[in-house]
């Protein structure tokens, strides 16, 4: 076969181009340090790289975003719980102070001011948020735990279930009040109209005060007794039913079950007092009295004992229209209907038909096929009982302050020197009445604060338990973070082995390719320098 110079030059060009393409390929690898630049170069490496890349992207999402977000949520929640515990420790200290001995006017003023500040701070902690999402409100992270200034128009139907044995406590009810007599009263020898007395009854507190409507307020077949209402039938409002542990209905305000007990509803304690002929707040042995203003149900001796013995539960539905700023929103604690917008009523279910709490766990995906709940709900931290206790502490301190001011004012009248003889005797009678009211107020303050020594410690224990539960979640998250970190490192290493080339190997291959390219150029130059004409 005859080989021409043209054929030799074509072959040389082909070899040069091939060597150049190899140099280009090796140069690309040396620049990118990747084994392939196109899937077609090695489909196996390409497919494995895609799979590893997807896995690493997911792990990075968990490790760099989800887990830090969950950690932030839990850290903020933990700090809020810690702050609440500190607040309740201060409340506990005040309760101990108030339960021991007689307080001076300065003591009462100081306790009242501190309680107001602690109460406000407690609600502030309850509204703690993480990046604009409130941490104690379950799924409704765009809403606060408490009402704001706009609460005056809020309107709710609330259903509350209470275990009587657990929630019943002794309430002290003072009948009568002292007043500061006028100069004309003293000169006329006017005596105090009525005595001041105190009765103790078993009471149950509802979640809220100032109720708008309760069962029997507008009875379908009720009968009026005094200024209260004896409830037999309630067709307008929800039920008031007391059921024993064995399922026996002990009392039903709707009149569907016969009962030896009766319920009376009063607007205020003053109305309750006025209903009695001797102006004393009394409740019959088989009676129950509901005070809308205070949100309390007072049980007679027999009804209280019977219901405790039966381990009975009270289910009551009531309406409350208008809430004060910082009142707890009922949807986080009770089954209720928000009727604020009459054209858009909203029903909230916190307990199912079996009485079990409907939990609202906010879960983060922190690893493949692993979700972790990061939130603590308000009902697990504190509820309306704490709110009622703190408000009651403020009320009894305020009442004691008022009672002692009356006593001081009357004492100032005595010391003024303006009265003598019979007038002074009359004035001292008014002072005795004021002293009696002050003594009862001090006694009620002391007993209330004594109870709250235990109550505040129980709230602290509850917060400690919530903090422990949160800590367990934090430990689980920390272990998951460590595992995801190791998984991220392992996957990154596998991807590097699959995709990347060793730099020293690339340099050697590039050098070899470049040398071959240079050699092909030199060989081609020599082939083209001689032809048959040189020999003719």
Image (tube, helix red, strand yellow):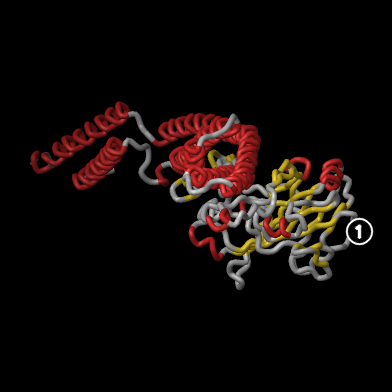
Front one among 451 and 283: 283
Q: Which residue is mark 1?
A: 258
168 sits left or right of 348 in the view:
right
Q: How many marks?
A: 1
Instruction: Tell me the residue at 79%/53% (across/down).
Output: 288
Q: Position of residue 400 (x, y in %)?
A: 57, 43
Front one among 100 and 29: 100
Residue ranking furthest to the front: 421
Q: Position of residue 74 (x, y in %)?
A: 51, 38
Task: Check disc 1: other Cα within 10 Å, few if <14, some if 14-19, many if 20+.
Answer: few
What element does badge 1 sit on?
loop
Instruction: Tell me the residue at 43%/41% (across/down).
Output: 42
55 sits left or right of 338 in the view:
left
Q: For residue 390, say whether it is visible.
A: no
482 sits left or right of 248 in the view:
left
Instruction: Tell me the residue at 59%/39% (across/down).
Output: 370
- Picture layout, residue 256 above or below residue 429: below
Identify the image quadrant of the N terminus.
top left
Front one among 397 and 87: 397
Q: Position of residue 352 (x, y in %)?
A: 73, 52
Quadrant position of residue 347:
bottom right
Q: Position of residue 366 (x, y in %)?
A: 53, 39
Identify the image quadrant of the C terminus.
top left
Q: For residue 133, say whether it is visible.
A: yes
């Amino acid at each position: 076969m005859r080989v021409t110079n043209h054929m030799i030059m074509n072959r040389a060009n082909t070899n040069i181009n091939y060597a150049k393409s190899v140099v280009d390929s090796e140069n690309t690898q040396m620049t990118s340090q990747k084994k392939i630049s196109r899937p077609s170069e090695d489909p196996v490496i390409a497919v494995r790289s895609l799979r590893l890349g997807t896995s690493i992207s997911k792990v990075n999402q968990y490790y760099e975003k989800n887990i830090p977000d969950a950690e932030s949520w839990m850290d903020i929640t933990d700090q809020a719980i810690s702050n609440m515990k500190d607040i309740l420790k201060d409340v506990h200290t005040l309760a101990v102070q108030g339960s021991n001995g007689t307080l001076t006017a300065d003591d009462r003023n100081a306790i009242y001011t501190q309680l107001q500040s602690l109460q406000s701070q407690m609600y502030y902690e309850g509204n703690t948020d993480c990046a604009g999402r409130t941490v104690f409100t379950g799924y409704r992270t765009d809403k606060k735990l408490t009402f704001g200034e706009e609460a005056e128009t809020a309107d709710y139907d609330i259903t509350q279930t209470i275990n009587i044995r657990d929630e019943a406590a002794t309430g002290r009810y003072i009948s009568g009040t002292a007043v500061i007599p006028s100069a004309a009263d003293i000169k006329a020898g006017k005596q105090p109209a009525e005595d001041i007395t105190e009765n103790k009854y078993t009471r149950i507190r509802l979640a809220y005060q100032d109720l708008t409507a309760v069962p029997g307020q507008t009875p379908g077949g009720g009968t009026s007794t005094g200024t209260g209402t004896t409830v037999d039938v309630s067709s307008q409002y929800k039920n008031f039913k007391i059921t024993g542990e064995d399922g026996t209905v002990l009392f039903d305000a709707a009149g569907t079950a016969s009962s030896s007990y009766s319920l009376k509803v009063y607007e205020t304690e003053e109305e309750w007092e006025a209903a009695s002929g001797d102006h004393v707040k009394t409740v019959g042995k088989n009676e129950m009295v509901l005070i809308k203003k205070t949100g309390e149900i007072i049980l007679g001796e027999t009804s209280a004992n019977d219901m405790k013995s039966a381990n009975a539960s009270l289910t009551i539905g009531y309406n409350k229209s208008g809430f004060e700023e910082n009142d707890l929103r009922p949807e986080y604690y009770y089954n209720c209907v928000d009727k604020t917008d009459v054209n858009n009523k909203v029903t909230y279910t916190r307990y199912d038909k079996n009485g079990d709490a409907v939990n609202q766990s906010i879960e983060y995906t922190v690893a493949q096929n692993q979700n972790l709940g990061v939130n603590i709900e308000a009902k697990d931290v504190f509820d309306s009982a704490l709110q009622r206790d703190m408000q009651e502490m403020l009320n009894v301190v305020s009442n004691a302050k008022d009672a002692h001011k009356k006593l001081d004012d009357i004492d100032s009248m005595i010391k003024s020197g303006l009265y003598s003889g019979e007038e002074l005797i009359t004035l001292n009678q008014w002072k005795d009445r004021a002293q009696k009211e002050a003594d009862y107020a001090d006694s009620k303050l002391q007993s209330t604060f004594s109870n709250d020594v235990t109550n505040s410690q129980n709230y602290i224990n509850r917060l400690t338990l919530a903090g422990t539960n949160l800590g367990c979640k934090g430990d689980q998250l920390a272990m998951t973070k460590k595992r995801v970190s190791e998984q991220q490192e392992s996957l990154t290493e596998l991807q590097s082995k699959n995709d990347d080339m060793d730099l020293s190997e690339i340099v050697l291959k590039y050098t070899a390719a470049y040398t071959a390219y240079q050699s092909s150029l030199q060989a081609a130059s020599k082939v083209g320098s001689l032809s048959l004409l040189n020999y003719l």
